[in-house]
Image: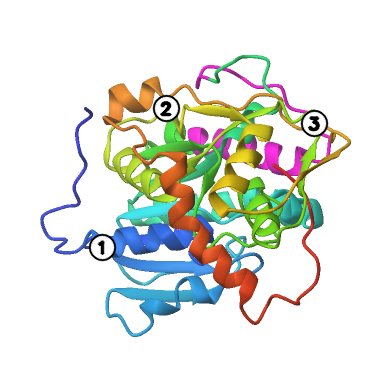
Amino acid sequence: MSAIHKPGRKARQPTSVVTGGAGFLGSHLVDYLLAHGHRVIAIDNFVTGNIDNIAHHGGERAFKFIEQDVTEFLFLDEPVHYVWHFASPASPVDYLELPIQTLKVGSLGTHKALGLAKNKGARFLLASTSEVYGDPLAHPQTEAYWGNVNPIGPRGCYDEAKRFAEALVVAYRREHGMATRIARIFNTYGPRMRLNDGRVVPAFIGQALRNRPLTVFGDGLQTRSFCFYADLMEGLYRLMLSNVSQPVNLGNPVQMTVLEFAQAVIRICRSRSRILRQPARQDDPHQRQPDISRARTRLGWEPGMSLEDGLKRSIPYFREKVLGPDRKKGRMKNVVE
């Protein structure tokens, strides 16, 4: 396992900045860092984040929230030890509706977050994505694979924003000697995902809880792998505190077809739903499975939560959303990532 980084002796409590701190993953990271003794400054402009995800920290001395677009200059008049850059639309619905904002946060937002880390002498972690591999021709995907991305396709704004962000992080490391980390995050799920955000887990669970058809695009034989958010948080923390500057895949290497996943959701939700086939979508990845050899050997990390247990821990959150006061707010967009 790699050496662990610790802030200087004078820093009694490390301070972490989390951009996108009100989003699905960002808010869970805020929880994790606070539980591990960090002071946390979360930054979000609520384009896709939700104040409810961090409201439970209101009034805590170790938590501070700043409402700001991270593409603007980030000024903090205090020490910062870690910068976690999670700001970005991250679902098909979001980046199809917000292509320019997605490209700006991946470029300008990453530039501003790196500038903050450089100014503070802080360690930096980029939340990248398995989407940098596009519709991969290599299987499973290792960090050495360069990807098969359509830069002008419907996913291009997100894929290329993250690929540019990775290049910018590496440039800052090489030119300024910064300590940087790159996490390539594969499909992650859990509470706080939006029901209508277009990703397969909330889409299928929401449909199953309503006993509506589960929408499967194409033949349903495209594969995905699903990592429970709590496992991912541990991997992210280990990566940040390690000495690994290379990109690291973080995800669950157990893959299954979208059809198999749909059937599992129907069974666990005890739903009367059936499966509805729709035409395949452009650039939809046919295979998505991480090779996590680097995470295992360099970080001593691998996910431990089974899909069955992870779904059982997630479904009550979605059930409350489906049966709560928001149940009549529009129809879900049936998009499967």
Spatial separation of the CA atoms under disc 2 and disc 1 = 27 Å
**Which residue is rendered at x = 67% and y = 21% of the image?**
136
Q: Nearer the viewer, mark 3 or mark 2?
A: 3
The answer to which of marks 1 and 3 sits earlier in the sequence is 1
Q: Position of residue 5 (x, y in %)?
A: 21, 42
Given the current orientation, which residue lies at the most extreme bottom position?
Answer: 59
The quarter of the picture where the N terminus appears is: top left
Using the image as rendered, state which of residue 61 and residue 209 is in the foreground: 209
**Which residue is rendered at x = 44% and y = 67% of the image?**
42
**CA neighbours of label 3 inside 10 A, class few (<14), some (14 to 19), many (20+):** some
Q: Amino acid at mark 1?
A: Ala
Disc 2 vs disc 1: Cβ atoms closer than 8 Å? Answer: no
Q: Which residue is mark 3?
A: 283
Is 309 drawn above or below residue 212 in the view shown?
above
The answer to which of marks 3 and 2 sits earlier in the sequence is 2
- Range of the magenta residues? 142-171
Q: Position of residue 81 (x, y in %)?
A: 30, 55
Q: Is residue 105 left or right of residue 293?
A: right
**Which residue is rendered at x = 16% and y = 61% of the image?**
11
Residue 3 numbered mark, or none: none
Q: Which residue is mark 2?
A: 246
Q: Is residue 301 left or right of residue 315?
A: left
The quarter of the picture where the C terminus appears is: top right
Q: Which residue is mark 1?
A: 35
Question: For residue 109, what is the image quadrant?
Answer: bottom right
Does the magenta segment cover residue 164? Answer: yes
The reply to whether residue 125 is visible in this rendering is: no
